[in-house]
Amino acid sequence: MDDKRLDRIEDKVDTIVDKIGSIDATLAAQHVSLKEHIRRTALLEAEIKPVKRHVDMVNGALKLLGLISLLLGIYEAFRMLK
């Protein structure tokens, strides 16, 4: 190979190495950002647990009221038939 062609190949390899270095820096920054996101997500999930428990309790209470209403309705229907 002539020297000109070899110099061009070396320049291209140098460019690729520079781009890989840039990609590594970007990945490192994204990794730090991801770790922070995971930490915040865990904190928010811990704060949401009492809210979910409360919602489940309210849903259970409403279902109980619905069942009681249904039973009272059936009782009234049978009482009217007598």
Image: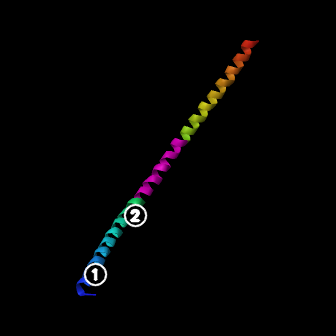
Report the number of discs.
Answer: 2
What's the residue at 68%, 21% (across, down)? 72
Name the mark on residue 74.
Answer: none
Measured as percent of width and height from the top left, residue 31 is found at 40, 63
Residue at the spot of label 2: 31
The type of residue carrying mark 2 is His
Measured as percent of width and height from the top left, residue 7 is found at 25, 83
Measured as percent of width and height from the top left, residue 60 is found at 61, 35
What's the residue at 64%, 24% (across, down)? 69
Q: Does the segment drawn in magenta span residue 4?
A: no
Residue with the most extreme front position:
1
Of circles 2 and 1, which is in front?
1
Which corner quadrant holds the C terminus? top right
Q: Nearer the viewer, residue 17 or 79?
A: 17
What's the residue at 66%, 24% (across, down)? 70
**N-terminal label among 2 and 1:** 1
Q: Secondary structure at mark 1?
A: helix
Horizontal relation, residue 46 to residue 13: left or right: right
The type of residue carrying mark 1 is Glu
Chain part drawn in magenta: 36-52
- Taking 73 as reference, is 42 above or below it? below
What's the residue at 24%, 87% (across, down)? 3
3D distance between C-alphas at marks 2 and 1:
31 Å
Which corner quadrant holds the N terminus? bottom left
Residue at the spot of label 1: 10
- Taking 81 as reference, is 25 above or below it? below
The answer to which quarter of the image holds residue 5 is bottom left
